Every structure is written in C-alpha cells, then in structure tokens.
C-alpha cells in the first residue's frame, strides 16, 4: 500500500482508494446488508438507468472493479490505521454531471469533480472533511486535472440534514481555496447548490 499520503492534517492521512484498500471503501460506502441495493457512492457516478439495474452484491463488485483501474474512484482518510472518511473524485467527463441539465459547465477545461464527502459517525467535527477534500484535489492534480470542482450547498451557515450533507458546504470548499464559479438549478436538503472551482 502507498505510504506517502496525498494530504495529512492533525494526525489524519489521505490515500487513494486502491484495490488493497477495498475493504475500507466497503466500510465507508457499502451497506450493512450486502444484499441491499443502496449507496456504494454510485448514484452520481453512473447513469440513473444503470444505477437502478445494478442491484445487491453486484454494486459492490462494480466498485471493486473501479479500484482495480488506473484511476481510482476516490480517496480515503485514516486516523492511524482506522478508515474514517471517503471522498469521491473523478473526471467530470466520465460522470452523469457531464450531461446534467441542472449543474452547468463552466468552460471546456477537463475538470474533475468531487461530489461526495463522507465522514464516519463518531468522527465528525474533527476537520476530517477538510483533509479529505485536500486529498481529493491532490489526487486529481496528480492525474493531470487542470481544475477541480464541487457542487456543495450554499447554506449560509445553517445546519444541513446529515443524510444530504455528503455534497459538502460552500464554506468547506472556500476553506480549501475554491471560489464560486456558477449558480445551479440543483438543490440538496432544501438549499441551493453552487459550482465551486479551484485550479490545481
């Protein structure tokens, strides 16, 4: 496994989601019941029709195959040897966002997207989302991305329902050096979503 982290802060370290770390990916995004047809962080990674048709254990198998590819499906945060966070990152051109009618294209640069940031219960409020986002940007940069974007809620400091908080907040992205690039027609947890961008 990689020993040099993509990012590190306050004892937390971030690494690519390689196949050797697939059990940790499962811990972060797999359902408790392997037969369930939920999550695995696929709803914004693959087309809606494919997402509906991919059921049960096939969902985990799909993500396991992603970890075997040259470009990994995301990054993982660790507190020591314990996995505590996940961020999905990939070229926007490979995602349904490329065809979104609600989230606009800012320009023709081959942007990478960070669209899901998840911290395990019991570990929240410790700054892990910040180091995860830094690691996701570093990973995209290492793969040649000229620019990285996210689609967080513009919640003006108001509390966001935890089930929808995976998109992140505008402030989280601003703290990581992102700036507002566009408004969108999308919402999450009742808040408008915005396109936040930064160069690598």
Image (cartoon, rainbow, N blue to C red):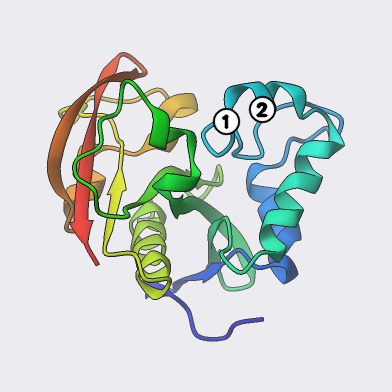
Residue 114 image label: none
Task: Give percent across and percent down for residue 190.
Answer: 31, 13
Task: Give percent across and percent down for residue 85.
Answer: 52, 54
Q: Residue at x 59, y 39 (%)?
A: 41
The Cα atoms of the two marked residues, 1 and 2, are separated by 6 Å
Camera-side residue: 152 or 128?
A: 152
Camera-side residue: 129 or 197?
A: 197
Residue 8 visible in the displayed image: yes
On screen, 98 above or below 36? below
Judge left or right: residue 153 versus residue 37.
left
Residue 51 image label: 2
Instruction: Evaluate if marks 1 and 2 touch, with contact meaning CB atoms under 8 Å apart.
Output: yes
Judge left or right: residue 169 versus residue 41.
left
Q: Residue at x 68, y 28 (%)?
A: 50
On screen, 81 above or below 196? below
Residue 176 visible in the displayed image: no
| Mark 1 Cα shell of 10 Å, populated few (<14), some (14-19), many (≥20) | some
Q: Residue furthest front?
A: 108
Camera-side residue: 52 or 179?
A: 52
Question: SS of the residue at dot 1?
Answer: loop
Q: Residue at x 68, y 61 (%)?
A: 67
Q: In terms of image quadrants, where is residue 54?
A: top right
Nearest to N terminus: mark 1 or mark 2: 1
Question: SS of the residue at dot 2?
Answer: helix
Q: Residue at x 56, y 65 (%)?
A: 71
Q: Residue furthest top?
A: 190
Q: In terms of image quadrants, where is residue 3?
A: bottom right
Camera-side residue: 186 or 116?
A: 186
| Mark 2 Cα shell of 10 Å, populated few (<14), some (14-19), many (≥20) | some
Query: From the image, which quarter does the N terminus lie in?
Result: bottom right
Task: Give percent across and percent down for residue 38.
Answer: 70, 27
| Residue marked by disc 1 | 43
């Amino acid at each position: 496994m990689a020993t040099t982290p993509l990012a590190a802060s306050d004892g937390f370290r971030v690494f690519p989601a390689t196949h050797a770390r697939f059990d940790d990916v499962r811990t972060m995004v797999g359902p408790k019941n392997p037969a369930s047809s939920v999550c695995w962080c696929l709803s914004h990674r693959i087309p809606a029709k494919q997402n509906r048709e991919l059921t049960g254990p096939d969902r985990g198998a799909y993500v396991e195959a992603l970890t075997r590819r040259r470009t990994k499906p995301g990054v993982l945060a660790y507190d020591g040897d314990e996995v505590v966070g996940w961020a999905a990152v990939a070229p926007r051109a490979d995602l349904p966002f490329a065809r979104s009618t609600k989230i606009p294209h800012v320009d023709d640069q081959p942007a990478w997207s960070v669209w899901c940031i998840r911290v395990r219960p019991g570990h929240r409020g410790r700054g892990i989302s910040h180091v995860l986002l830094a690691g996701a940007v570093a990973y995209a940069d290492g793969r040649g991305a000229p620019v990285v974007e996210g689609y967080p809620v513009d919640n003006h400091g108001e509390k966001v329902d935890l089930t929808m908080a995976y998109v992140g907040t505008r402030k989280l992205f601003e703290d990581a050096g992102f700036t507002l690039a566009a408004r969108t027609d999308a919402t999450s947890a009742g808040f408008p979503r915005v396109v936040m961008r930064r160069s690598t």
